[in-house]
Image (spheres, grey):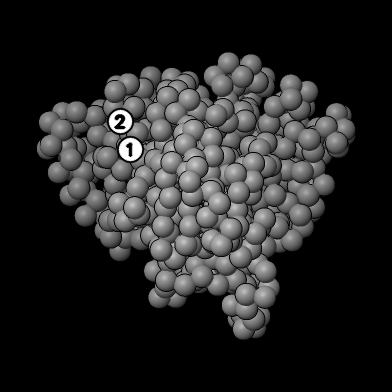
Amino acid sequence: MTEVPAWSSRDQVLLMGGTIYSPASPFATAMLVDDGRVAWVGEDSAAHAYRDSAVAVVDLQGRLVTPGFVDAHVHATSTGLALTGLDLSGTSSLAEALDLVSARARRLRGGVILGHGWDETRWPEGRAPSRSELDRATWGSVAYLSRIDVHSALASSALLAMVPGIEALPGYSTDGPVSREAHHSVRETALASIPAAQRQEAQRAMRDHAARLGIVALHEMAGPTISGEHDLVEVLALARHEPGALVVGYWGQLAEDGGIERARELGALGAAGDLFADGAIGSRTACLCDPYADDPSTSGAGYLDASRVAEHVVAATEAGMQAGFHVIGDEATRSVIAGFVDAAGRVGVESVRSAGHRLEHAEMLDDDAIAVMARLGIVASMQPMFDGLWGGPGGMYERRLGSRRANSMNRIADLIGAGVLVAFGSDAPVTPLGPWAAVAAAVHHSVPQQRVSARAAFSAHTRAGWRSAGEPGTGVLSPGAPAHYVVWTVDEVIVQAPDERVAAWSTDPRSGTPGLPVLGGDAPLPQCERTVVAGRVVHDSGVLA
């Protein structure tokens, strides 16, 4: 669980004249915050009793107040480096990407080049740069440029020369991107070259950016080959000592390698997160039952079998710690689910349920897998923007998998309908931080049967993030709950449904259901005016008195 930060506010603040998104009082227009917690929620007519005792009275001027967002899957330093460094996510061609790399190399004058976000499926060339093209663009510098899914990367010859035995590792390419174990080693070497001061600058930039988007808590997915021990320790310490989004840490290392003990020593909540069962669809490293449609020579790469999954789940359960795995492909999912079933048979279903284990991404689930997740209380930590970016006709999923498999990806509605706890995140820097965009992507899923209501999607990106971290009472604006909230400027607030057939009654206030902003179409996303964590303002646009 997250600790109450030393910097939390003890002041009593009264908010009036707005719309408060609260299950405790669906018609609330006012809220009192005291000692870092919600003390009262109600209507303006009753709020005047608190005016004299409040240190500050905030006139919301009709704005919406909601619980703050939780991003249930991020990589803080990598996201910060993308924000402050070389961002290739907006490039429209291979040539443009190489031009940006070359310009960066000239500015750094021999320094290490770190970049992220290229996606060859969006380029007219339809391919990644060759090693020789990258070396020319970097002028021989050390360069690491992760693909958008961070499961393969471009590495310059100078960087590869720093990794002993790289040629013998699975996923090594003589002239193209590296993937699998070769990528893990290259990434580890590249990130180890970053000075501590630069890492901390990136972490601060990421938490500041999160606050400006209304994010009050982050689940950091660390691991030995992802970011390293020092990185996790630093980002957790930063969250304890400096105002901003709270951070829950996860350490992705198997119990057989000492992962349970190391996670506890590092201050992580679980030996979970990006503990890789396979790779990603875009890099063709997600482990599939059948070959990729656009490359029948491969079915991806699986890193864990059912027996190793079971051993890890048993060890974590007995240690009272969350276990969890990164899993995307259907074959990898079968192994992970079989491992959970085996573990439950050994330690008992209720023991597994009480631990609240997690699956990250969980993109290719069949009905049997969903049923097991519901029975064993396994959390689905999902990223709606994966579908927003890569789903739909002609999207990356369809090109890689074919239409049949593409249409069975990211079964958000089926999971929620089965009673599985679904928590939303971004996997930043894979997709940008942007919780309202993620909520909209879930509401307007490319597969109509997987669309959910705005209320369900909002809950998945707020309260479910806290529940998945063992804090069920957080993420709502009810008396006694921590005061993690955001003030938004919105055009219109309605009670939304995912189906236009029932939208006609959705604006009726008699429903007693708190409203949310209109999402999708031409409607602008809500504008974050103030973000408050534990009663303390961590972002303020300046429009509120």
Residue receiving disc 1: 205
Q: Mark 1: give few (<14), some (14-19) or many (20+) Cα within 10 Å.
A: some
What label sits on residue 493 in the rendered view?
A: none
Q: Amino acid at mark 2?
A: Glu
Residue 271 or 341: which is nearer the viewer?
271
Residue receiving disc 2: 201
Determine if residue 225 is in view.
no
State the image coordinates of residue 335 (x, y, percent, origin top left): 72, 41
- If the image is split into quadrants, where does the N terminus sit? top right
State the image coordinates of residue 21 (x, y, percent, origin top left): 57, 59
The answer to the question of whether label 1 and label 2 lie on touching residues, with beta carbons closer than 8 A, is: yes
Residue 131 or 258: which is nearer the viewer?
258
Q: Is residue 487 left or right of residue 123?
A: right
Look at the picture and state if 451 lies above or below 476: below
- Residue at (58%, 58%) from the top-left corner? 46
- Residue at (27%, 40%) from the top-left corner? 84
Q: Dividing the picture into quarters, in which one does residue 406 lie? A: bottom right
Badge 2 marks a residue whose secondary structure is: helix
State the image coordinates of residue 236 (x, y, percent, origin top left): 47, 26
